[in-house]
Image (cartoon, rainbow, N blue to C red):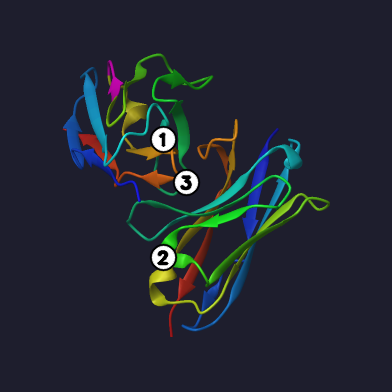
Amino acid sequence: EVQLVESGGDLVQPGGSLRLSCAVSGFTFTNHWMHWVRQAPGKGLVWVSRIKSDGSITDYVDSLKGRFIISRDNAKNTLYLQMNSLRVEDTAVYYCGRSRDGGSYFDYWGQGTLVTVSS
Amino acid sequence: DIQMTQSPSTLSASVGDRVTITCRASQSISSWLAWYQQKPGKAPNLLISKASSLESGVPSRFSGSGSETEFTLTISSLQADDYATYYCEQYHTYATFGQGTKVEVK
């Protein structure tokens, strides 16, 4: 059974940092690009970042470049998102997602982890 | 950046109704479009990829069509389990979601 389990969400002050993790199982992690997608409370879905199966290519939504860093540890079957200089508007549920066929659409998602940025 | 515009934002319908949701891309995306269903407090669920390819396990009352810049998701006969929010997503260039269409009880 394919499983993606996010962790690391928390309440953090503006300007702080947080690292999210997504532990996967049930499939060959090294065969898939992986992504982060976020959803602010009551709002729509926003793609955040993606990383190639071997970690050699990373991409970000323009508005987040320079503050967020995606990475993966293929030996641990785990995806990460390092979030720095956090702002109130980064408050959201963060989902990790697996993409298929090399296309950036998501056939499996985690349950999400909530990041709240507030003083 | 490619922008995706969904309409309507909210749709009121009854069980048994035929429901159509439209998604427009700001530039041609060929058929690189997916549709998702999301229920409150849950992660989205992939319904359709490549504009019209139904995912395994998704009921056949769901269908997708379109290409280039105009796409539709159709539910042929709405069921109680279909009340949810639906999102389109282009994956021609990175990924961009539409703003969502909430299907609610009429």
Front-most of residues B1 and B58: B1
Front-most of residues A63 and A81: A63
Q: Output the chain of dot 3.
A: B
B77 w.r.t. A94: above or below: above
- Label 3 sits on residue: B94
Percent position of residue B73, x then y: 30, 25
Q: Output the chain of dot 1.
A: B
Q: Amino acid at mark 3?
A: Tyr
Give SS at disc 2.
helix
- Label 1 sits on residue: B36
The part of the image, by quadrant, that contains residue A27 is top right
B31 w.r.t. B102: above or below: above
Give SS at disc 1.
strand
Percent position of residue B30, x then y: 37, 28
Q: Amino acid at mark 2?
A: Ser
- Label 2 sits on residue: A63
Q: Is residue A6 left or right of residue B63?
A: right
The quadrant of the image that shows the N terminus of chain A is top right
Give SS at disc 3.
loop
The quadrant of the image that shows the C terminus of chain A is bottom left
Q: Amino acid at mark 1?
A: Tyr
Please state the extent of the stretch shown in magenta in the rendering.
Answer: B73-77
Q: CA distance from mark 2 to mark 1?
A: 24 Å
Q: Residue at x 37, y 45 (%)?
A: B97
